[in-house]
């Protein structure tokens, strides 16, 4: 298989090492999203993240998660090509910006529908001990049938217990991630609350002029009320999700059982028995050696073929004791972050910058803020 089997129609998004295109598969005349990753240009950790996304997508089949179709090596461009379901209505960030531009709003019924579908998608991941770790409006897609689908699992992680790597997007990152503390699936629940708030207010729940102010607002859980045109039930749901203490946030199952949720929208769903993940795809010595390690195509049906041996002792799982309170020093990269919906918190900071909010005055803070990244026309990357 190669990109010769597809007709590239348009570019949907672009990152430092990957580009996503809308493509037409010649054999079935169907549109898909093709993510081309410059695999040989990645460092070892990012290579594993790219393969981790393939592994998770190929293991999980659910209407509220972007569907995996195929992955292959395109030798002509030396890229790893991931073929996924195409969401013609784009992402929620695009819809938020459209409403702002037109001075319109999401209806309350739309917001309840989106919220419940996001919860159902998250429930499938959490049942398999998978943390998404980057839930945001730009990573939630809408297909032609208005089905909401979680995407961009590049930094998702299979864990036992707690995770510790600081990752995510500043506006949506939980207090525990901001404070560089161990976290679990309740961190995704916080990010879910941020997205639902954004659908109501058409702006992030936590806004600030610099990172220090943003940090203070997030860790204290300070945000403005949603517009009065929305119900008290919707406000109560957001308040429940944006609890500063992780233990006070509900699980996906508890959210779907809430009377205020059931009252506003049907939460019935097919009960799914969690299946195992396919075996971890290890980073090979060369791109060519990766060919035989990739999962088979899955165009015919959404049900994943999990015949590959499930690896219960994967060393990519993080086993972290709750008793440990040490702040882990991050490896050096020279990269930093800025409070933009399109940029992620980076764990690769210099040791002395592991907590940029400690013993820093406002002048020093401003000097550490990088340029705002370029916008892209769609956030599949």
Image (cartoon, rainbow, N blue to C red):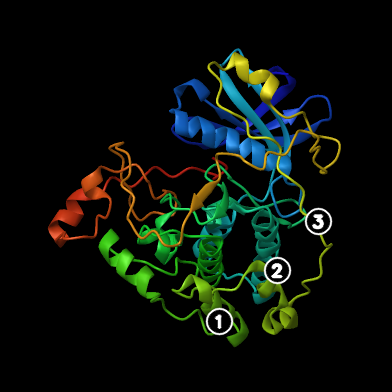
The quadrant where residue 114 appears: bottom right
| Residue 241 locus on image (x, y percent) | 54, 73
In this rendered view, identify the residue nearer to me: 271 or 88: 271
The quadrant where residue 252 appears: bottom right
User: In this rendering, does residue 63 appear at all?
Assistant: yes
| First in sequence: mark 3 vs mark 2 | 2
| Residue 142 locus on image (x, y percent) | 68, 53
The quadrant where residue 306 appears: top right
Distance in Å between CA atoms under marks 3 and 2:
23 Å
| First in sequence: mark 1 vs mark 3 | 1
Distance in Å between CA atoms under marks 1 and 3:
32 Å
Residue 235 is labelled as 1
Residue 318 is labelled as none
In this rendered view, identify the residue nearer to me: 142 or 364: 364
Quadrant of the rendering where the C terminus is positioned: top right
Residue 273 is labelled as 3
In front of the other: label 3 or label 2?
3
Q: Secondary structure at mark 2?
A: helix
Residue at the location (58% across, 71% down)?
105
In this rendered view, identify the residue nearer to me: 311 or 342: 311
| Residue 358 locus on image (x, y percent) | 21, 60
Left or right of 97, for residue 181: left
Left or right of 28, for residue 151: left
Distance in Å between CA atoms under marks 1 and 2:
15 Å
Q: Secondary structure at mark 1?
A: helix
Circle 2 residue: 113
């Amino acid at each position: 298989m190669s990109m010769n089997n597809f007709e590239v129609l348009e570019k949907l998004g672009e990152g430092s090492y990957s580009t996503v295109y809308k493509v037409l598969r010649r054999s079935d005349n169907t549109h898909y999203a093709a993510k081309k990753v410059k695999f040989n240009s990645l460092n070892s950790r990012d290579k594993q993240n790219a393969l981790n996304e393939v592994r998770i997508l190929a293991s999980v089949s659910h209407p509220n998660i972007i569907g995996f179709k195929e992955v292959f090596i395109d030798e002509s461009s030396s890229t790893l090509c991931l073929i996924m379901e195409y969401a013609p209505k784009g992402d929620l960030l695009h819809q938020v910006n459209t409403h702002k531009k037109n001075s319109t709003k999401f209806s309350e019924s739309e917001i309840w529908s989106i919220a419940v579908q996001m919860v159902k998608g998250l429930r499938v991941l959490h049942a398999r001990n998978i943390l998404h770790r980057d839930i945001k409006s730009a990573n939630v897609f809408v297909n032609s049938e208005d089905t909401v689908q979680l995407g961009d699992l590049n930094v998702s992680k299979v864990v036992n217990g707690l995770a510790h790597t600081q990752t995510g997007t500043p506006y949506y990152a939980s207090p525990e991630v901001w404070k560089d503390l161990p976290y679990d699936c309740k961190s995704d629940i916080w990010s879910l609350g941020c997205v639902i708030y954004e659908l109501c207010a058409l702006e992030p729940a936590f806004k600030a002029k610099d990172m220090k102010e943003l940090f203070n607002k997030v860790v204290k859980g300070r945000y403005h009320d949603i517009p009065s045109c929305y119900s008290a039930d919707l406000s109560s749901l957001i308040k429940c999700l944006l609890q500063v203490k992780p233990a006070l946030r509900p699980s996906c199952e508890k959210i779907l059982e809430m009377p205020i949720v059931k009252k506003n929208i049907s939460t019935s769903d097919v009960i799914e028995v969690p299946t195992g993940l396919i075996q971890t795809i290890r980073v090979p010595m060369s791109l060519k050696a990766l060919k035989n390690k990739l999962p088979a195509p899955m165009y015919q049906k959404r049900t994943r073929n999990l015949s590959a041996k499930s690896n219960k002792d994967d060393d990519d799982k993080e086993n972290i004791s709750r008793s440990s309170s040490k702040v882990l020093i991050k490896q050096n990269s020279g990269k930093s972050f800025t409070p933009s919906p399109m940029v992620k918190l980076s764990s690769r900071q210099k040791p002395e910058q592991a907590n940029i909010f400690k013993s820093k005055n406002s002048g020093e803070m401003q000097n550490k803020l990088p340029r705002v990244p370029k916008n892209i026309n769609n956030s599949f990357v």
